[in-house]
Image (tube, rainbow, N blue to C red):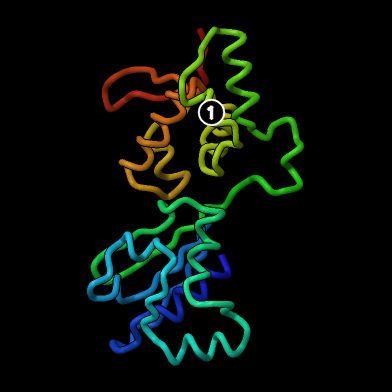
Amino acid sequence: MREALINAIVHNDFSREIPPVFEIFSDRIVFTSYGGLLPGQSEEDFFSCSSMPRNRELMRVFKDLGLVEQLGSGMSRILQHYDKDIFEISEHFIKVIFPFSRYSDSQKSDENYVNVGVVREEVRKKYGKSTEKARENKELLSEKQQIIVQHVRDHGSISNRDVQQLLAVKDSRALKMLRELVEMGILKKIGKSKGSYYVLFEK
């Protein structure tokens, strides 16, 4: 989050006298910088961790203060801990959205912490449910997937709209995450219309 905050400042386009905006909501923190992508810069370039500073002098000042280690390193550190979908890129603005998580490092040993390897193995043993994805991927569920699964455990079900509001993501991203959890054999979709919802997988 520190890296995203610094990026929002040093890559903001101050030529229009529009400062970066930092907002705190009940479920998320949002950093918004003005200027969009640089001319000639693609989204692939943006996420490639190669440095294309908008304000070279400001970047130099931050580097002299020890707030920036090396050019291009900030994005690399962000992507080590978060998916690209926390970024919303438009023509004139770049937003970074950090949803609050109910999980912390100290909770990883808690019985309610969702380990995808354990969940998939339990599903496979109980129901004979096994997918290629489940066999290949053994790591912990992503932070956002954890929140979705825990919501279902707490409330019995979840809808696409619930995911959008819970994680501050767009409809397409919410649908993708739900589909992935269905493919993993963790969730099951109920219904086919707009009123469809998802529950924990049961035989």
Q: How far across and down, in percent of the image, does residue 99 sit?
A: 51, 53
Side (left or right) of 77 relative to 178? right
Q: Mark 1 is on which residue type?
A: Val
Residue underneath mark 1: 152
The residue lying at 52 percent from left, 20 percent from top is 200
Place residue 193 in its image quadrant: top left
Q: Secondary structure at mark 1?
A: helix
Q: Nearer the viewer, residue 166 or 121?
A: 121
Q: Residue at x 39, y 64 (%)?
A: 95
Q: Quadrant of residue 45?
A: bottom left
Is the residue 11 above or below the residue 120 in the image?
below
Instruction: Note whether 141 is above or below 96 in the view shown.
Output: above
Q: Is residue 64 left or right of residue 179?
A: right
Instruction: Tell me if 124 is positioned left or right of 95 in this view.
Output: right
- Residue 160 at x, y = what percent? 37, 34
| Crowd tier of the residue under label 1, counting other residues whose Cα lies within 10 Å: few below 14, some 14–19, many 20 or above | some
Residue 128, placed above or below residue 3: above
10 and 98: which is toward the camera: 10
The image shows residue 100, relative to residue 184, as above or below, that is: below
Taking depth in this image into account, of 75 and 148 the one nearest to the observer is 75
Tell me which residue sits at (48%, 85%) in the image.
Answer: 59
Q: In the image, 148: left or right of 39?
A: right
Q: Nearer the viewer, residue 163 or 33?
A: 33
Q: Going 39% across and 82% down the picture, which residue do you hit?
A: 19
Position of residue 203 measured from the top left corner of the image (x, y, whole percent): 50, 7
